[in-house]
Amino acid sequence: MLLAVISSCNKEKDFNIYTDSEPTMIIYGFLNPESDTNFLKITKSFNGDATIGTQDYELNNYDYKLYVRLINRKHQNDSIAFDTTSVYKPWDTTSPFYSGRRQLVYFTDEKLIAGDEYDLYVRDRSGNEVTTRVKLVSDISIAWPYAQNISFLGSYNSEIRWSRENPSQPWAPYYEITGYFNYRQLNPGDNDTTDHSVKWYFGNGTPESLHMDNSYLHIYYTPETFFSLMLADDNIKNNSPAGVQRWYEDFTVVVSAAGEELYNYTIISGSESVIQDSPEYTNIEGGLGLVSSKINVDRSYSIAVKTMNQIQRDYPEWGFITEVEPE
């Protein structure tokens, strides 16, 4: 089974960032048509000892602003220029890379169009140009469960179903479906509640491997699996002292779609061949890295009354109550 493709490819160490030759531009980012702002991280390779050089911010980054443009192939006159900003990366003693400082990123708040194809151009001050082409994934919406609440009772299969906003656009190459049971907790003696969630990984697959029905894709799950997940959850198991109180929030279903480049990267980088090293995947012409597309769509449901009643009847030690949470 593939690893979580939407969330697993987020570490710069997945690409070689040092070299024995001239510096190579490294570009990393996911373009999300649902996002108000899209970001690109652009760094460079370097000569020397990687274990030392990765901690040197100046060695990894350009000391000037690069030319970064994104052009919609349907509308060649629409050139989107990326500007620069900085984000803070907290200090991480376990990371082989620089941290504990602000880092330069490129961004645009121009709205991108789902399903369209874009060309990215990045040029340094010497005139060297690095390019790639990315097809954005199509917009989707969660169609089922249709009701405003969700039940976790019963051993018969239920389903999560989603559709494309524009049926004329193709399905994304890969999907992941995840649920989160959200609740608030108050331990005895504490004054403030804390937020918690229990993750339910429903599954993943390509459109061909998932269930397809007319204009929908769907995946099946067994509702009562919820109770097994709760019993295995670390916070429920290890932090349920006598007198603990918990309040139901909601259950959020998330359908994540990945572009072709991200899907291909996960397959190739996940190779377990004993004959040869895993090949290095990049979709950057003239450089290294990965620029692809992704989208996350979610829908929240209240917990059905019968489910709440069974939780409180069969698992009173969990401390769930339906009374109004104190201010």
Image (cartoon, rainbow, N blue to C red):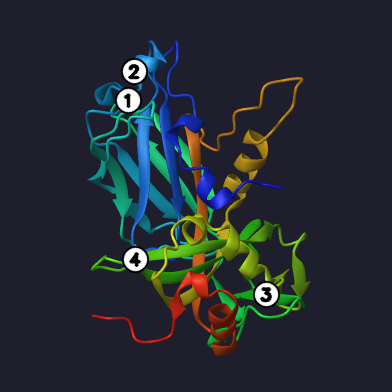
Which one is nearer the viewer's eye here, 240 or 228? Answer: 240
Q: Amino acid at mark 4?
A: Asn
Q: Are marks 4 and 3 in contact (CB under 8 Å)?
A: no
Residues at marks 1 and 4 touching, judged by CB atoms closer than 8 Å: no
Q: Which residue is mark 4?
A: 187
Find numbered disc 2 in the image and state the secondary structure of the residue it sits on: helix
Dot 3 lies on which element?
loop
Q: Which residue is mark 3?
A: 223
**Is mark 3 in CB contact (under 8 Å) with mark 1?**
no
Structural distance between the alpha carbons of marks 4 and 3: 28 Å
> Which mark is on residue 60?
1
Query: Which numbered disc, 1 or 4, marks the residue closer to the eye?
Result: 4
Question: Residue 53 shows which numbered tag?
Answer: 2
* N-term mark: 1 or 4: 1
The Cα atoms of the two marked residues, 3 and 2, are separated by 50 Å
Q: Position of residue 29 (x, y in %)?
A: 43, 45
Amino acid type assigned to the residue bearing label 2 in the image: Gly
Q: CA distance from mark 3 to mark 1?
A: 49 Å
Query: In the image, what residue occupies the spot 43% across and 66% down?
Result: 34
**Nearer the N terminus, badge 2 or badge 1?**
2
How far apart are labels 2 and 4 at the CA level?
46 Å
Disc nearest the viewer among 2 and 4: 4
What residue is drawn where x is 72% and y is 80%? 154
Query: Which residue does the image show at 54% across and 52% down from the upper left?
Result: 6
Residue 201, position as x, y percentages in the image: 61, 60
- Is residue 169 in view? no
Lower position in the chain sequence, tag 4 or tag 3: 4
- The percent coordinates of residue 245 (x first, y second) are 39, 73
Residue 108 position within the rendered picture, expressed as x and y whole percent measured from the top left: 31, 55
Label 4: state its secondary structure. Answer: loop
Q: Earlier in the sequence, mark 2 or mark 4?
A: 2
Q: Foreground: 233 or 162?
A: 233
